[in-house]
Structure formats: structure tokens, C-alpha cells
Image (cartoon, rainbow, N blue to C red):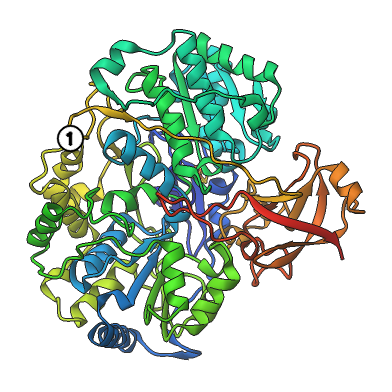
Amino acid sequence: MVAPVRTTCAYCGVGCGVLATAEGGRKVAIAGDPAHPANRGRLCSKGTHLGETMGLEGRLLHPMLGDDRIGWDGALDLIATRFGEAIAEHGPDSVAFYVSGQILIEDYYVANKLMKGFIGSANIDTNSRLCMSSAVAAHNRAFGEDAVPACYDDLDEADLILLVGSNTAWCHPVIWQRIEAAREKRGTKLVVIDPRRTETAERADLHLAIRPGSDVALFNGALAFARQAGLVDRDYLDRNVAVLPGFWDGLGADVAGICDVAQADLDRFHELIAQYPRMVTLFSMGVNQSVQGTDKANAIINLHLATGRIGMPGAAPFSITGQPNAMGGREVGGLASTLAAHMDFAADNVDRVARFWRSDRVAAKPGLKAVDLFDAVGDGRIKALWIMGTNPAVSMPDAGKVRAALAACPFVVVSDVIADTDTARFAHLRLPAAAWGEKDGTVTNSERRISRQRGFLPLPGETRPDWWAMAEVGKRMGYADAFAWPNTAAIFREHAALTAFENDGVRKLDIGRFAAIDDADYDAFEPFQWGGARLFGDGRYATPDGRARLVAVAQKPIDAQPMILNTGRYRDQWHTMTRTGLSPRLSQHRREPLVEMHPEDAGAAGLAAGDLARVATGQGESIFRVSLNDGQRRGEIFAPIHWTDRTSAGGRTGLLPGQGVDPVSGQPGFKLTPAGIARI
Ligand code: SF4
């Protein structure tokens, strides 16, 4: 009997521990890891059925130049040559990487070092920009650093949980199971703030179906109420928080009107806030994927800081990430707006990183964020692009525009496990990546817990880990010494050492402790939560004066539109379905993409359940089957993000949202697109 391998789930940011047992060939038995603190043995449907997705159907197994095999040496030489030529002729900012919250910390580290450290550009961004970059920006504004204060245990210890813009029951199911267990055990109250009556909202004590985009007004109103009701913690503010003059002005005007909720529901919301100081506010894509996402997150954080509900058990603002390693990418610095190891591009940071990497080419300024990056591809500024583990031809807003950009790019490399993705169709060169279960490394989940992903299957065909391919290109570009790691343990040691290098920040030194970890200890690495269970218990923050910031945020006007489109996930599918689409059981939950709309809106448009309808926006159009749902607000329709050219003739939601972004974070606003819907 083969012993199970302890690894971490391939999918979401909950980061559940998985026991995987290879049973011969590609057959794998999956169970939850009872020893992993994130899930304590629980798994959701996606994790449970991972074993059904391990086959080689559709896999990319060889490096391919167009339709021809090229072999790794030829492929790597070609990348080094084409990137080198672009850099020589047009400078380092003429090339870019677009990576993914699916790749591992070690992959991220090598990508970041190659692009920012040796190519000398910060043009490396990630699909995490689409996921949680507004939470990152809000943390930086409020705490002086990108740090999530909370841990999952806080969900067990809270008396009140606010879920904002999160269909947790579908999108973070094991967190949801934990919330349900806590409610059962201690009677925790649950408020769900979401324009849609989702499965999560149906289970809430109070559902506030607010007008989309009105979250800032709602939380500013809650803060005004807290002040009036004497809930503001003056001692905490005096000691630990900087309140700028004028902060309290204008909070709380006409909240019920702006948010379009009943005053009685708003009063109940305020009563619960007053009654239960142990309050966790969990927020996700409904907050982040907005052109005012950073302000929304800061409005939530303001309420917690002002009432002192942070840094103690059961009380914190808590951003949960969508992807398995969105957080690890942040730690490495895999966003165009971060240099490395949570450092920004301040001159002393650039100097420090340059000395650590022994490079005189380190990027000195931020690079292009996702939307701007693909704009630069489209207008010819980017001459060579390497995309890794993500499918921007589907997932970027206005995906049609992104497709046109990719088609015009002189040299596109795509590293993926799947041979035929919508993005791979634009690639000049495709590289066969090692998949989950074949590769080794680490990921960080939403509560800052680093866990190992471990390989338990041999590499099929000519597949290789992403870090290896990038290191080989680094060597071919002339940086052999800087990219000579024998394994992922060595990369992790270097990442930890950079994190600690001349760094007196205690939290970051927490990762720095692994700078000397040996290969055996890396192999046996137990899940580790950097910074400890929760942050800011001492009331000290990473700002120059050690005090957090109450950031004044004002609700922006919300344009009245006859119909708006909201987008999101289904329970049993993941991103563009390249893995979950392989599981017959997962496909039973929703067999096709549906556009959900209120029955009265449908009636007015002459639509009935099951009709085919064309959804059109300023960016594009696609066809969906209509599903009637009185949990939709009037004037709002919802469509899932998963289906692609490869999987469906219609339901291609990525073509529809616009490219408006949050001005601070650069995160696109997927949730509020003016749209029309008509029978076909
Ligand atoms: Fe995997 Fe997320 Fe499900 Fe856990 S909750 S099993 S990490 S998909």
C-alpha cells in the first residue's frame, strides 16, 4: 500500500490540505488532510473530485513551435533570443510576463527575479491583479503594509460575521463549512451584503441586497452609527490610529437611499454591530472587483480600526483570496506594483534588492498592471510576452480586445498544462508545464499560511516546472550564476533570505527563518503561518509613526443604467474549466452557462426560462440560456465566468465587461457592466 502524500489543493485560496495516494498509472485517491489547520480534513466538491482530473486528456506534453515539436533546447534558446533582441532594440520595458495565482512561490520568485532583477523591467503582472489587488492597496493605505490581520480561527471565535461581496458557500466552501459549524456551536450571527440572494445569502440572519457599488456608503454609514452610538474606541484611536482632520465629515448621509435597502434592515444591521464587538468582516470579489474597490476595502477597515475590532480573537477585517497562491505571489513581489518581498520601489529598497541579487539592472519603478500591460501589447510597445498558467483571452475584461492584442504581438510564449486554451491559440511557442501533483513547491493561503504542494506523479512527456524553464532562460540570457538552483528547496531558501535581508520587520523575518532550511526539512515542511495567528495585537503598524490610518473615502456616484451585468463563479467550476471541466461529477452541478435575471425583467423583455438570449455590452456580446431567479435585483443580470471558445459556443462572459479599473489598485471592475439582453 502506497502511503498518501500530504499536499495542498489545486484550487482556491482556502488552501486545504489534501492526502493524495497514487494508485497506479494516473489513478489517484483524494482525501482531506485532518492534520492541516486550514481544513482539518474537510474538502469541498472540487477538492474531493481532484482525482477525476489527473488524466492526460488534452495535456500539452512537448514544447511546440506553432504545430511542430521543437524540443526544450530549441524553445529556450528561442525565448532568450527573441526577448534579448527586443530588449537590445527597444529597452527592457518592451518585454513582459503575465503570470498567475496558480503558480507556486518558487515559480513566482524566479519570474520576479528574472524580470525585475536582471531584465530590468517591472513588467510582470499576474491574474491576481483581477482578484485581490484592491485589498492589497487598502492594506497598504491603512496598515502601511500588505498584511491580512486575521486567521480562520477568528471565524470560530466571532459572534458576528459580515460577508461582503462573497458567495462563500460556493466560492470558499470549506470556510463556509467552518462558519456554519461556528453558527451551530455558538450561535454566531451572519450578515450577508450582496446584491444577489445567493445560497450564502439565503442562510444569513440578515441579507442586505444593496445596490451594486454602494458598499462605501453602507460602511461609512455604519461608522457614523458607531460614532453616534458610542462604539468608537477612543483609547485605541488615541494610541494606535492616525485620524486625519475632516475624516468624520459627511459620513452616513442617506445610506438607505444610496444603498437601496429598507431602513429597518439597516437599523437591524447597526443593532448587530452594536451588540457584537467580536466581529469579523470577510470580503472578497464583490468588494475588490470594482472601480472603487480600494475605497470599499478601506471603508470596511475603517470600521474595524475605529471600533478597535482588530488584532484580537474573533475581530478583524479579513480579505479572502480567490486563488491557491495569490498570497504567495504578493509575498514574493509578483505584482507590477511591488518590487520584491513586500517592498515597494523606494530607492533604498531597490539598492537593497540589487545588492542581494548582485545585479546592477534592478527595475527602479513599477511596471504595467494587467489592463495597461495588454494595452501595451496591443499598441506595439510590448514586443515579447510570456504568459504562464493563466488564460487572459478568457479571463481579462474585454477579452476581445485582449485577443486582438495577442494576435498583434510579435512573440507570445504560453506555458500551460493544457495544449489548447483560448490563449494558447495566440502563442507562437507553447511550453508544457508540470501540473498539480507533478510539481513541488509552496503556496500561501488567505490566512498567511504557507503549505507545501508535493509531487506524487512522474512528469509526463517533456513537461517541466515553470521555475525550471525560466531559470534556463535566465542562464541563456547570460545570468548563469543567478539562476543556478538545483531544486525548489534552494529557491525557497533564497526567497526567505531576501525577505530577511537587512529587514528589521519582525513579520517578514518570520519567513526569513527559513533562509537556512535544508532539503530534508523543506520536504517535511509543516504548514506555517507567518506573523503568527493574527497581526496587530500590539497595536503597532508598519507606517513611519507606527499608527494605522483611517482613510477618508467617499461614495462615488453610481450611474443609473437600465440593466447591468454582474459576473462570478459557479460552485463546481474553477476559472476557465481546464481542470474542473474534466470531472463528470463536477459538470453535473451546472451543465451550461446561464444568464440569471428577475422574472419581471424577463417578462418585460419577452423572455422565459430556457430561452436563448443575447447579452450585449459596449465591449461584445454572447448568447446564454435564460434562468429566472427572483433573488436577482430588478435591472441586474448575472453570468458565470467559466466557459470558453473551447468549451461552449456561447456563454463567453469574458467578452462583456469593460476595462475600467480602480485608480489606486488597477483592479478591473467586473461587477457592474451596463448591458442589454434580448431574445434571439
Ligand atoms: Fe480546494 Fe478551496 Fe475546496 Fe478547499 S475549499 S478543497 S482549497 S477548492
In the image: residue 59, left or right of residue 439: right
Q: Which residue is nearer to you in this view: 521 or 162?
A: 162
Q: Which residue is nearer to you in this view: 563 or 258?
A: 258
Residue that mark 1 sits on: 544
The image quarter containing residue 141 is top left
Horizontal and vertical percent position of residue 89: 26, 88
Q: Residue at x 54, y 40 (%)?
A: 556
- The quarter of the image holding the C terminus is bottom right
Residue 521 shows in the view: yes
In the image: residue 453, left or right of residue 13: left
Residue 388 shows in the view: no
Q: Which residue is nearer to you in this view: 427 or 263?
A: 263
Q: How many marks?
A: 1
- Crowding at dot 1, Cα within 10 Å, few <14 / some 14-19 / many 20+, comes out as few
Horizontal and vertical percent position of residue 662: 47, 50
Q: Secondary structure at mark 1?
A: loop
Relative height, residue 310 to residue 19 (above, below): above
Q: Amino acid at mark 1?
A: Pro
In the image: residue 418, left or right of residue 146: right
Relative height, residue 160 to residue 302 (above, below): above
Relative height, residue 591 to residue 76 (above, below): above
Horizontal and vertical percent position of residue 661: 49, 55
Horizontal and vertical percent position of residue 73: 29, 86
Q: Residue at x 57, y 66 (%)?
A: 394
